[in-house]
Amino acid sequence: MEMKNQLFGLVPQEVAVGMSGLEFLRGILEGRYPAPPFAEIADVWPVSVEKGQVVFEARPSSRFYNPMGLVHGGWLALLLDTAMGCAVHSALEAGKAYATTDLRTTYVKPVREATGRLRCEATLLHIGGRTASAEGKILDSRGALIAHGSETCQIFPIAKGGKDN
């Protein structure tokens, strides 16, 4: 599923906080809820969502080139952060939110537009009451490793009125 026909926007917070992270992410995957606005600009989309396991795909483009004619590492970090954050989100109960507090990215191979579609697989490693951690890897269409990373997220309650508790 590419995001070509996908709607982009925000799910009202009072709706989002009333469901588990897995329900919310599956709603985006299935097109019942809009994808977040950044996904349209970054050209990333979910492919698979299970509790603690998510897969995203993305299309590198010359729009993301750095001065050396390679895809900027920040775009690859965005892809990893998206997938790893969603791996955490997929395990959250209703009324909980998360924010990335630490992101580590290791780049293995350069990426250009000609590299083609990338696949980012992320797995939840740990979830507690206040923090969670995940790891991820980006692969090219032949399965070669492009980059890998890990992240820590803060877990916190979020009120239906939109204010953090």
Image (tube, grey):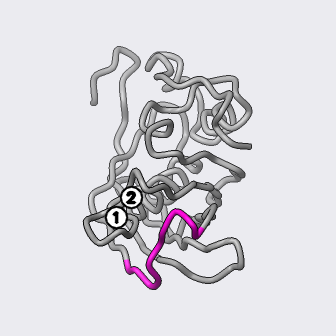
Quadrant for residue 54, please give it.
Answer: bottom right
Residue closest to the eye, 72 or 53: 72
- Amino acid type for the residue under numbered disc 1: His
Please provide the residue range marked out in magenta: 106-115
Q: Are marks 2 and 1 in contact (CB under 8 Å)?
A: yes
Please count the marks in the image: 2
Left of 67 or right of it: where is 96? right
| Residue 102 pos. (x, y %) | 28, 64
- Seen from the viewer's position, the closer of residues 54 and 124 is 54
Residue 81 location (% of width, % of height)? 42, 58
Which residue type carries mark 2? Trp
Residue depicted at x 47% and y 16%: 12
Using the image, determine if residue 133 lies above or below residue 87. Answer: below
Q: Which residue is mark 1?
A: 72
Q: Position of residue 116 (x, y in %)?
A: 62, 64
Judged from the image, the secondary structure of the residue bearing numbered disc 2 is: helix
Tell me the residue that label 2 is attached to: 75
Left or right placement of residue 35 versus residue 155 in this view: right
